[in-house]
Image (cartoon, rainbow, N blue to C red):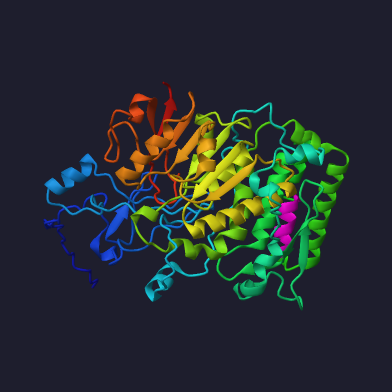
């Protein structure tokens, strides 16, 4: 008898299940979200990436990049999401963060000779800290220049001392010698504790020399790196200088081989540091120095300079950065003491000054005057970049002292770089009571006054000075003298009746006290 399996009947039953509402497309499931994923910002590629709502902004990807903005614009999709009661990762009220830059001027706008010390002030400002400076090279256009000035001879010429004396400033005629501050000095003495060896295996730090494109003796550096990267870095200074020499002092065919990312001088120097090989570093620098000396001797570098009638902005910024690093930066905290609004000032950054020189057609035949010149940055840039006769006057003791030190260092450093400067005169005093300045103003071509925080009475007193400016002279100011602004002055002798004034925007990161664009004015003496 055979047994058989019983047949089992089955039936498939579909049971309806109530599904929860679908989450918005831009929202992750709550089980996959962490507490830090409460806000997001759309990067430039359009995708949403979560970020902490209170965390720091992303770091720049290179020394040329600025900190990215995280301000979110509310789209129509976001509006619909709110209307339907759904939550969204996008936040429409995130405050935009201010972005930092690292110019060669200090990031503050006040100064005074008040020497009162305060613990809070010292802790907040970081006494004895030196301003971080980066390479002056401009990746977008390293050859950005003013209009060529065919009358200017940029290379230092071998001229008769008696004739040369006629082109000197009052300071130079008085016998004030320009003394070069070597990079070596910046890591010695009081500063030695701020540095560590670049080659730790050596018993003592190696001292090297860099030959500049001139007949001057080389500059000496110590192979050390700062503990704090906001301090002066001798190796970076060498790298940036080599880059500028290659870019602007050598012919194109030679420049192409020296900028190689495989075996160019800068690449070899950096590779030696990475390998911890002082011998390779010394050899690479020696080879570069030998090449520059040879190109000076055979006339290659003089020929390139003689064909140049405008100094590239990147080279201008590099030289000014070197000057500032060695004079003002080590003591920059002294500029931050605030006494009152009348002693508040700010610096115009090199790119902004470059624009002003271009707009006012400043040349080696011009006379430039800066009223309230601070530490002298714009005056020095005028003499270096344009070759103009350049004057400045500053009433505050500390900035005026730094200005004199910067002028001395620039004179010495310009010889290293083989660049002829325009005469420089920096006065210490009140521009309302300076007879030598009054005579200069009568023949000035361009006058700069940063009157951003000047009281109305001071602006009014300046108008009396400007009545004597010659026809065609240009006055550059940070507040209008004649357009009826909050500090404008209107009377029978108003500058509005004598000058034609136009307003401009500086563009971002043009002044030391603000990252956003500022308005400025150029008035031309027309009647």
Residue 172 drawn at (x, y percent):
68, 48
Residue 471 appears in the rendering: yes
**Quarter placement of the N terminus:** bottom left
Residue 213 drawn at (x, y percent):
77, 46
Q: Which of the 4 image quadrants contains residue 464?
A: top left
Nearer to us in this view, 376 or 502? 376
Residue 367 drawn at (x, y percent):
57, 34
Query: Who's the residue at 74% across and 47% down the image?
Result: 415
Q: Which of the 4 image quadrants contains residue 331?
A: bottom right
Nearer to us in this view, 5 or 226? 226
In the displayed structure, would residue 316 be above or below residue 523? below
Taking the view exactly as shown, the residue that stands out farthest to the top is 527
Query: Who's the residue at 21% across and 40% down the image?
Result: 76
**Quarter placement of the C terminus:** top left
As drawn, is 298 to the left or to the right of 388? right
Query: Who's the residue at 56% across and 64% down the image?
Result: 330
Residue 271 is a magenta residue? yes
As drawn, is 274 to the left or to the right of 290? left
Residue 148 drawn at (x, y percent):
64, 28
**Main secondary structure along the magenta-highlighted residues:** helix
Q: Which of the 4 image quadrants contains residue 496?
A: top left
Q: Which residues are magenta?
A: 263-273
As drawn, is 309 to the left or to the right of 58? right
């Amino acid at each position: 008898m055979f047994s058989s399996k019983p047949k089992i009947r089955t039936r498939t039953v579909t049971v309806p299940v109530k599904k929860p509402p679908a989450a918005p497309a831009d929202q992750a499931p709550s089980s996959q979200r962490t507490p830090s994923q409460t806000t997001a910002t759309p990067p430039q590629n359009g995708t949403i990436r979560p970020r902490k709502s209170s965390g720091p902004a992303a770091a720049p990807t290179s020394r040329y990049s600025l900190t990215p903005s995280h301000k979110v614009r509310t789209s129509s999709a976001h509006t619909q999401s709110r209307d339907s009661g759904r939550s969204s990762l996008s936040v429409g009220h995130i405050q935009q963060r201010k972005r930092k830059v690292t110019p060669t001027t200090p990031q503050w706008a006040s100064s005074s000779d008040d020497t009162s010390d305060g613990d809070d002030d010292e802790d907040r400002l970081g006494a004895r800290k030196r301003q971080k400076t980066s390479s002056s090279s401009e990746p977008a256009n390293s050859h950005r220049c003013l209009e060529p000035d065919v009358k200017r001879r940029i290379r230092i010429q071998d001229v008769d001392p008696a004739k040369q004396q006629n082109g000197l400033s009052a300071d130079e005629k008085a016998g004030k010698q320009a003394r070069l501050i070597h990079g070596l000095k910046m890591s010695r003495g009081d500063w030695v504790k701020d540095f560590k060896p670049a080659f730790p295996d050596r018993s003592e730090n190696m001292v090297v020399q860099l030959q500049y494109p001139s007949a001057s003796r080389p500059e000496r550096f110590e192979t050390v790196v700062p503990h704090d990267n906001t301090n002066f870095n001798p190796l970076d200074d060498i790298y940036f200088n080599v880059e500028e020499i290659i870019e602007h002092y050598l012919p194109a065919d030679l420049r192409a081989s020296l900028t190689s990312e495989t075996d160019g001088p800068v690449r070899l120097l950096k590779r030696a540091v990475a390998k911890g090989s002082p011998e390779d570093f010394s050899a690479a620098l020696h080879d570069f120095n030998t090449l520059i000396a040879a190109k000076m001797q055979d006339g290659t570098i003089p020929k390139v300079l003689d064909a140049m009638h405008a100094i590239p902005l990147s080279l201008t910024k590099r030289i000014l950065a070197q000057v500032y690093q060695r004079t003002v930066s080590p003591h920059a905290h002294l500029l931050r003491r605030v006494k009152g609004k009348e002693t508040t000032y700010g610096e115009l950054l090199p790119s902004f000054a470059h624009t002003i020189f271009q707009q006012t057609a400043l040349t080696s035949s011009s006379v430039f005057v800066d009223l309230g010149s601070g530490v002298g940055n714009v005056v020095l840039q005028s003499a270096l970049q344009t070759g103009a006769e350049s004057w400045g006057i500053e009433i505050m003791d500390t900035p005026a002292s730094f200005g004199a030190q910067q002028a001395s260092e620039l004179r010495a450093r310009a010889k290293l770089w083989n660049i002829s400067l325009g005469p420089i005169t920096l006065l210490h005093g009140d521009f309302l009571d300076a007879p030598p300045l009054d005579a200069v103003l009568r023949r000035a071509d361009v006058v700069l006054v940063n009157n951003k925080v000047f009281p109305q009475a001071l602006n009014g007193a300046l108008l009396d000075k400007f009545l004597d400016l010659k026809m065609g002279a240009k006055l550059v100011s940070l507040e209008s003298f004649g357009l009826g602004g909050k500090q404008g002055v209107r009377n029978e002798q108003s500058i509005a009746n004598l000058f034609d004034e136009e307003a401009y925007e500086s563009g971002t990161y043009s002044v030391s006290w603000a990252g956003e664009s500022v308005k400025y004015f150029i008035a031309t003496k027309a009647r």
